[in-house]
Image (spheres, rainbow, N blue to C red):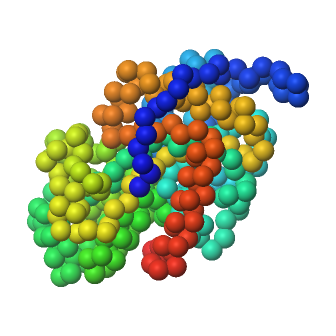
Amino acid sequence: MIARRNLFGAATAFVVAGTANAQPKFPSEPVRLVVPRAPGGGTDILARLLQPGLEKRLGVPIIVDNRPDAAAVMGAAIVTKAKPDGHTLLATDNSFYQNPAILDSLPYDTLNGFTAITMLAQAPVLLIVHPDVPAKTLAELLDLAKKTNLTFASGGIGSSTHLMGVMVNLKAGTTITHVPFKSSGQALIALLGGHVTMQYGGLASAPPYIKDGKVRPIAITGEKRDATLPDVPTFTESGLSGADVSSVWGLHAAAGTPIEIRRALRDAVAEVMRNPETAKQLAERGYQTIASTPQEHQAQTEALVAQWIEVGKKVNLKE
């Protein structure tokens, strides 16, 4: 789990004017923010919560461009080929850091084809079930899984919601079948329709359906219960330790994007996240803000990629 850190330092000016190297003004045109997930999932919701504030800070339109596929590869491939001037960005989630351990080949180099801007936020993963499922606790659900065929929906191959299901199967000795979707929002729709038994998802979209009784929460990742769902126990509390995957979100640009531009973008993000109204909206949806520096997030990216490659040597992450 990425350690949560407070937003720090006053945001610097976000316009990068000409320098001794004659670097052009930034931004000089609308910024395209590629979201490699379908609308309604955690990555898309986070991008759209930040969009208005970033437009105000940067003074140009922020165009959220959804390019979904099951493994969040298509959007990343677009950004790695973009001009490295900060006007095309990639909203990353767990799949970006985990795909090198899961997919046999990628149309880009995760570590050398991109450069980091900031780790935006992290959040716990929530396990919810359809109300027709008789299990009320994790122990009852896992016992049921050993007696009948159950399915779990995720926001896509390589996502935290996928890998949490893998880890639960590993630790509990179950064989719950994975059903991937292009976003957590689509996975939630499938659960609401009764097409899958359960879903591993985030706090961004599930609470209203929990309140209305359309889904039932079972357990949540993390060291302690989440303040927005205080009655939902952690997986460890529920008797299953060692299965704890957090959702993380970052921001990347094409390799070669100047550090001055990346710092300006990071500082703009940090300033937007400090806005009281935006901070409230983020917290209500379970996002724990981070806003690391470009250098910090580059190190975080390298560490996460290495971590999941090591896990992939021990566990089958491809199902």
Rendered residue at 51%/37% (across/down): 291
Query: Quick check: can you spot residue 39?
Result: no
Rendered residue at 73%/54% (across/down): 113
Rendered residue at 53%/26% (across/down): 9
Q: How many marks?
A: 0
Where residue 253 appears, as percent x and y from the top left, is 68, 43
Give the image quarter of residue 200.
bottom left
Viewer-proximal residue among 144 and 118: 118
Give the image quarter of residue 12.
top right
Q: Quadrant of the C terminus?
A: bottom left
- The residue at the far front in this view is 9
In the displayed structure image, the side of residue 149 where residue 252 appears, left or right: right
Rendered residue at 13%/48% (across/down): 231
Viewer-proximal residue among 145 and 14: 14
Give the image quarter of residue 89.
top right
Determine whether 73 is above or below 310 in the image: above
Q: Quadrant of the N terminus?
A: bottom left
Where residue 223 appears, as percent x and y from the top left, is 27, 54
Query: Quick check: can you spot residue 17?
Result: yes
Determine whether 163 is above or below 216 in the image: below
In the displayed structure image, the side of residue 280 where residue 263 appears, left or right: right
Where residue 153 appears, as percent x and y from the top left, is 35, 62
Where residue 132 appears, as percent x and y from the top left, is 14, 61
